[in-house]
Image: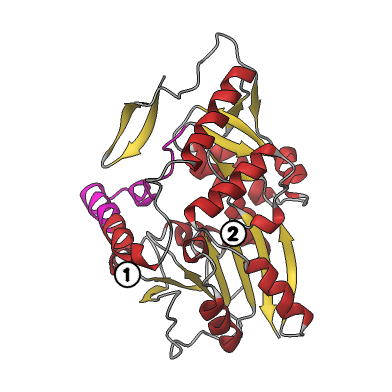
């Protein structure tokens, strides 16, 4: 099977060399996601703004046959036993810096913000939705699903704040999305890769991001001198995942700065159901990659001692081939 994957300055057609691909059948049952589907999954009443984004992104899911599903699950299991899978951690700083630099070069060549999308999106034509696996037809569908999660959460918690800080902002694509929701806030992107600051600076120079700034910030060694604006919000999107169990320095930093609200869209094993095969495989992949571990449990401990207030812990039921990685945690320091 061949499928499209975004690479460099164009979409290329790429063949799965391992032959673990999904076999297509002539007739497929499809599900065109509507507002009510997201309301049921998110367990929330969603706005007209969100409804417009559902129509704009037009995600269509294709149900898999039993054979196709089995083949995909086998692919995931094989990946779990693959010794060459790269673990997250502090030693990967240089790789992230190089990766964002490649995005920057593509963006400067084309002036197209789509080239700011991290290149791991759209690599496989499979996504997770409501604890099952589906095929998607467009390479943008994976990032579109994340975008819808972000629109929901950004509008709900970050839309009326005077300043918002994204920690682990990477190429700034989430900040561009946030700007759609909050037109006036001061936006600040922080990342440990210097190439990230180059990207944010270019976005500001080109007036793609207004009233925005950037800082170099290391989750493993937070700069205590960094001040946050009063009544500000803090968020992360699939960024804390890279620090495994080493989240204490960042949490202590946030506790000391006392922002108004903290929002995380991250892989949270505690919220998945390990009696469900698809969820179980996701948790095993978290462990394989050394992703965020124990974060929610630590926040619950802090709440029990009166140091923070947890506002929400829930799943979006959205994910990619290997992980259900977009669970939601919302809290604030006391």
Query: Residue 178 magenta-drawn?
Result: no
Q: Is residue 61 above or below residue 330?
A: above
Residues in magenta?
Answer: 101-124
What residue is shown at x 53% (from left), y 85% (from top)? 229
Instruction: Tell me the tag on residue 197.
Output: 1
What residue is shown at x 25% (from left), y 49% (from top)? 106
Front residue of 237/201: it is 237
- How many marks can you see? 2
User: In the picture, which quadrant includes the N terminus?
Assistant: top left
Q: Position of residue 288 (x, y in %)?
A: 50, 51
**Earlier along the polypeptide chain: callout 2 or callout 1?**
1
Give the residue at mark 2. 265
Q: Is residue 28 visible?
A: yes
In the picture provided, is 217 more to the left or to the right than 61? left
* Residue 217, quarter of the rendered image: bottom left
Q: Is residue 146 above or below residue 93?
A: above
For the residue carrying disc 2, how many other residues have a C-alpha within 10 Å: few (<14), some (14-19), or many (20+)? many
């Amino acid at each position: 099977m061949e499928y499209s994957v975004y690479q460099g300055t164009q979409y290329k057609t790429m063949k799965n060399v391992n032959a673990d691909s999904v076999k297509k059948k002539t007739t497929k049952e499809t599900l065109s996601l509507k507002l009510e589907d997201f309301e049921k999954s998110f367990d929330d009443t969603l706005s007209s703004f969100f409804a417009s984004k559902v129509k704009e992104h037009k995600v269509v899911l294709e149900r898999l046959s039993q054979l196709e599903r089995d083949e995909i699950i086998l692919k995931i299991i094989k990946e779990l036993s693959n010794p060459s899978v790269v673990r997250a951690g502090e030693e990967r700083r240089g790789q992230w810096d190089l990766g964002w630099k490649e995005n920057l070069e593509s963006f400067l060549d084309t002036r197209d913000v789509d080239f700011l999308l991290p290149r791991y999106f759209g690599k496989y034509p499979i996504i997770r939705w409501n604890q099952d696996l589906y095929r998607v037809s467009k390479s943008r569908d994976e990032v579109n699903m994340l975008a819808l999660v972000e629109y929901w959460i950004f509008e709900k918690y970050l839309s009326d704040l005077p300043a918002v800080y994204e920690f682990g902002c990477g190429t700034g694509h989430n900040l561009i999305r946030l700007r759609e929701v909050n037109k006036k806030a001061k936006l600040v992107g922080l990342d440990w890769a210097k190439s990230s600051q180059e990207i944010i600076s270019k976005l500001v120079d080109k007036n793609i991001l207004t009233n925005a700034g950037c800082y170099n910030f290391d989750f493993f060694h937070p700069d205590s001198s960094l001040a946050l604006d009063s009544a500000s919000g803090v968020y992360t999107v699939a960024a804390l995942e890279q620090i495994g169990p080493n989240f204490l320095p960042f949490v202590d930093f946030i506790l000391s700065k006392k922002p108004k609200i903290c929002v995380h869209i991250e892989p949270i094993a505690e919220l998945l159901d390990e009696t469900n095969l698809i969820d179980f495989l996701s948790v095993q992949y978290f462990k394989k990659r050394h992703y965020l571990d124990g974060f929610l449990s630590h926040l619950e401990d802090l709440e029990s001692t009166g140091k923070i207030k947890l506002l929400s812990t829930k799943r979006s039921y959205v994910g990619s081939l290997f992980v259900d990685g977009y669970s939601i945690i919302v809290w604030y320091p006391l």
